[in-house]
């Protein structure tokens, strides 16, 4: 395992990438990003929905439900697999394996978190633990895979580090080949006293990984070798957001030309142009996620781009809403299209189904997952009345059903 410590105040700091993508070996020619596609015409009849949670008196691990694609109805949740704080989830591209971070803290000065690998029973949806692997840091909060499922990337919020671990043919994660410790701080003394890596994703070419560090106000960029499971510093090493903004999560546009970062502390979204050849981010625009007349306390959590590429959504915790934006396909700029209450408290995460018809919002502090219909013409969200009682939901992911 390689451990690298970089001072973010120097040119050796890095950037981390988001989302699934085709993996190319380092130095190999990158496949061209594909243009946005319309949601598939032939939608599956149902999707299996997995929900990661914080465990405690009410929750024992990862829960599953069925989403009826015709009506948006959810079946009653049932426990799919037991685990300690399996908060953020990532599905293997084959659908055979599900990965979760076990968001736990270790003893002082010691790594405590892990990536858990589960085998998915295609008939029952039950999860069988295949193995666990330390993330080389403390308090992991995010896990993502490359598009070919060769490497898992994890972000450790507590220790402010990121790692890359190869995945075997049987789905089991190996010891991290690379662990990178971030260093530095931001202007917010309560939230940015040190680095807090909040997400890491592969870019659509599979050549880079982008990591949003809330404590540093940087999106760090790494060169990714998915075949070997390694991360290496890129030049330039990062892109910055406004001081004190606190970048949290990142989503790529399906065309591969734009990336969107939601800033937890400032309650904004920053649109970047992404140069996949050079591995660089150039800021296009930063827009607020809250109404201009809102004066209460709120923070942001999740950002997602609609599969059709025309709309973007961001969650507000406190205002308890989803901000809706239209995307200009030529420039990547965002135009506000209003807000939709999530009908619960503290929307930690939400996901859009692969066809683009439904959005499921996970309200962490009201123990609910709520279904919204997406208007294909305007992107606006319509409550369906469907909701499921899931304890402390944190992350939602979908698995196609036959």
Image (cartoon, helix red, strand yellow):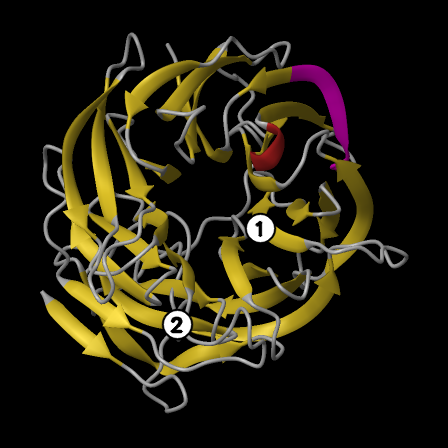
Disc 2 secondary structure class: loop
Q: Could you say which disc has been placed on residue 161 in the image?
A: none
Q: Position of residue 147 (x, y in %)?
A: 31, 45
Real-space CA distance between mark 2 and mark 1, rounded to the nearest whole angstrom: 19 Å
Name the residue at the right extreme.
Answer: 293
Q: In this view of the protein, which residue sits in the foreground, 22 or 4?
A: 4
Q: Which quadrant of the figure has residue 130?
A: top left
Q: The magenta stretch spans which residues? A: 379-386
Q: Residue at x 10, y 36 (%)?
A: 169
Q: Split into 4 quadrants, where in the image is the C terminus? A: top left
Q: Could you say which disc has been placed on residue 15 in the image?
A: 2
Q: Position of residue 14 (x, y in %)?
A: 36, 77
Q: Could you say which disc has been placed on residue 301 in the image?
A: 1
Sequence-wise, which precedes: disc 2 or disc 1? Answer: 2
Q: Split into 4 quadrants, where in the image is the N terminus? A: bottom left
Q: Is residue 285 visible?
A: yes
Q: Is residue 3 left or right of residue 336?
A: left
Q: Is residue 382 magenta?
A: yes
Q: Position of residue 231 (x, y in %)?
A: 23, 67
Q: Which quadrant of the figure has residue 33?
A: bottom left
* Residue contact at pointers 2 and 1, CB within 8 angstroms: no
Q: Is residue 235 left or right of residue 359?
A: left
Q: Position of residue 394 (x, y in %)?
A: 48, 37
């Amino acid at each position: 395992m390689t451990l690298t410590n970089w001072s973010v105040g120097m040119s050796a700091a890095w950037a981390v990438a988001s989302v699934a993508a085709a993996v190319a070996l380092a130095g190999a020619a990158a496949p061209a990003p594909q243009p946005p596609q319309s949601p598939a015409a032939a939608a599956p009849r149902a999707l299996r929905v997995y929900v990661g949670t914080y465990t405690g008196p009410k929750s024992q691990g990862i829960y599953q439900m069925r989403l009826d694609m015709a009506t948006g109805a959810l079946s009653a949740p049932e426990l799919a697999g037991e685990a300690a704080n399996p908060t953020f989830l990532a599905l293997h591209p084959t659908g055979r394996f599900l990965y979760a971070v076990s968001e736990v803290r270790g003893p002082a000065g010691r790594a405590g978190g892990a990536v858990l690998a589960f085998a998915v029973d295609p008939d029952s949806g039950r999860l069988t633990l295949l193995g666990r692997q330390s993330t080389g840091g403390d308090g992991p909060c995010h896990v993502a895979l490359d598009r070919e499922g060769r490497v898992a990337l994890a972000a450790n919020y507590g220790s402010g580090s990121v790692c890359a671990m190869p995945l075997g043919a049987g789905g089991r994660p190996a010891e991290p080949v690379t662990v990178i410790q971030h260093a530095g701080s931001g202007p917010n003394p309560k939230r940015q006293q040190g680095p807090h890596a909040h997400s890491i994703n592969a870019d659509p070419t599979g050549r880079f990984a982008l990591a949003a560090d809330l404590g540093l106000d940087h999106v760090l960029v790494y060169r990714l070798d998915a075949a070997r499971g390694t991360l290496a510093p890129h030049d330039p090493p990062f892109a910055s957001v406004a001081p004190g903004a606190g970048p949290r999560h990142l989503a790529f546009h399906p065309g591969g030309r734009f990336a969107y970062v939601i800033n937890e502390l400032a309650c904004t979204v920053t649109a970047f142009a992404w140069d996949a050849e050079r591995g660089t981010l150039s800021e296009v625009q930063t827009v607020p996620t809250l109404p201009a007349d809102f004066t209460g306390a709120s923070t942001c959590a999740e950002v997602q781009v609609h599969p059709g590429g025309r709309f973007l959504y961001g969650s507000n915790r406190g205002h308890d809403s989803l901000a809706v934006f239209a995307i200009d396909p030529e420039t990547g700029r965002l135009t506000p299209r209003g807000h939709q209450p999530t009908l619960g408290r503290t929307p930690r995460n939400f996901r859009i189904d692969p066809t683009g018809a439904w959005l499921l919002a996970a309200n962490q502090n009201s123990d609910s997952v709520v279904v919204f219909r997406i208007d294909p013409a305007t992107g606006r969200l319509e409550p369906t009345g469907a909701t499921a009682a899931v304890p402390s939901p944190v992350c939602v992911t979908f698995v196609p059903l036959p």
